[in-house]
Image (cartoon, rainbow, N blue to C red):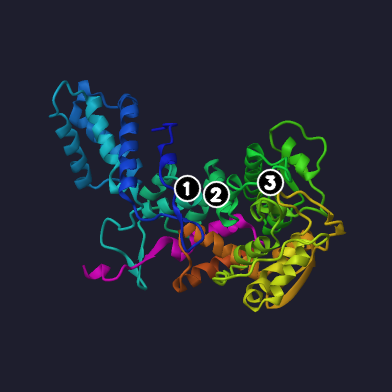
Amino acid sequence: MNDPSAPAGAFAGESIGGSGFATPGIVSAQDVSGYMDAAETLASGNAGKLASGLSCDPALQGDAMCAKQFVEGFGRRAYRRRLTPAEVADLLQVFTEAGALPGNVTFTDKLQLLVRAILQSPQFLYHWELGLSAPHVTNGAIRLTPYEVASRLSYFLWSSMPDEELLGAAEANRLGTPSSLAAEVTRMLQDPKARDTVTSFHSQWLRLDNVLRITKDPTTYPLFNDALRRDMKAENAAFVNHVLLDSDAKLATLLGATFSFVNEPLAKLYGVAGVTGTGLRKVALDASERAGILTQTALLSTTANAYEASLILRGQLLREQFLCQPLAPPPAVVPPLPALAPGQSLRERSKAHMTNASCKVCHELIDPIGYGFGNYDAIGAYRTTEAGKAIDASGSISGLDGSDQSFNGPAELAALLSNSNQVKNCIAKQWFRFAFRRAELPEDAPSLSSAFDAFEKADYDIRTLLSALAQSPSFSYRSLAPGELSQ
């Protein structure tokens, strides 16, 4: 309908599921009410425009014929597939019954009720993967219909419904081979809609939306305000989209690039001269101070509290999100760390974790990683001293690719992560979880393996990884529900 009102913005957000990414949850009565209100608002505001856009003239060809044309056309977009004859008949019944309402009911009035019905139907609201005929079963899995594959692909890469070209490919049964899926991925990643998806993945993966909610002590951090929060988020979006969609898409660039996109307030924070205005622009950063997404201000600000940086949160983020090693929750009763003594650094204070047996198990996995971020304060500004002492940014990662690895500062850390098979595998899993909105299962192992092989052969080009995931068996098949074929 090309309606700019975006009513979905008022709906409750999706919850973070076991995959670590937004996952559709149970629909509540409040959700249903919101869907109804949105459907009624959209229908009342757009029915006239939709009626005028029909190639059929009710005055010449009759209401019934024009309603049928509308149901088959608009319904195909809304349901993301051709409607069955029974579905067409049911919707035309709504149109017919609307004509029996009191008063002078026009064609547009009846069309308005029809739009309301379509926009509240389960076929529109949910991603149905039930097929329309006898299922094609292979090794205990059901092959998705071409329309279902098209929807999976569209919501993976665009977070939105298929466009006309993708629906046409499904109709012509052109989504059944790896090469056809690869061609669609290439096309879709060139569309501007892919940028929102790339932004969403990184925001969820690195928990960057928190930057819009965190607070900082205004006395300690006078630069931090609402505008800077938004700039930090925008910087990350501009950077990840440039790397993945406009540049080489390499994991090494994502983790180790010595450039970013800043405006005047961000340039002040980064210590970059010559940048004015509010628009973001690409600038070179000091390679001894910055390394890709690891040292961007949004990530550093969200892994800190209102007063000081958190070596713990930074180490935990790396361990969980880059190594795919979730940590156990802390003990029920944890003794607080002592307050910073005069002349004491965060690193020195954190060593108290290692003297407590209940804390040591987890903190020896995360604190030494966090030491490498000691040069950054709670809003990501670079510093060389803390409490009057030179900062020691040496750190280590235990168990990285089967051994303990040492590094000094973010550039060396970025190089370690970029070269780690463990990290590369974790990145592949994170994109799998985002694409499928669920955690991987044992039966997904062949799909993950084939996707990782393609990722590796392409020198860890993330665009190739996305294409390989779309070509994998898990993408075009779904598991049988218990007792499904016996019903």
Alpha carbon of mark 1 to alpha carbon of mark 2: how far? 9 Å
Q: Which residue is mark 1?
A: 159
SS label for mark 3: loop
Instruction: Give the label, 1 or 2, closer to the camera.
Output: 2
Q: Nearer the viewer, residue 339 or 14?
A: 339
The amino acid marked with disc number 2 is Ser
Is 39 displayed left or right of 190 in the figure?
left
Instruction: Give the label, 1 or 3, closer to the camera.
Output: 3
The amino acid marked with disc number 3 is Asp
Q: Nearer the viewer, residue 381 or 154?
A: 381
The amino acid marked with disc number 1 is Ser
Q: Identify the disc placed on residue 200.
A: 2
In the image, the segment drawn in magenta is 458-487
Residue 105 position by quadrant: top left
Q: Are marks 1 and 2 in contact (CB under 8 Å)?
A: yes
SS label for mark 2: helix
Q: Which residue is mark 3?
A: 217
Instruction: Give the label, 2 or 3, closer to the camera.
Output: 3
Relative to 238, say whether 25 is above or below.
Answer: below
Is 90 displayed left or right of 14 in the figure?
left
As for residue 162 lying within the magenta part, the answer is no
Q: Residue at x 60, y 70 (%)?
A: 334
Q: Earlier in the sequence, mark 1 or mark 2?
A: 1
Q: Earlier in the sequence, mark 2 or mark 3?
A: 2
Residue 369 position by quadrant: bottom right
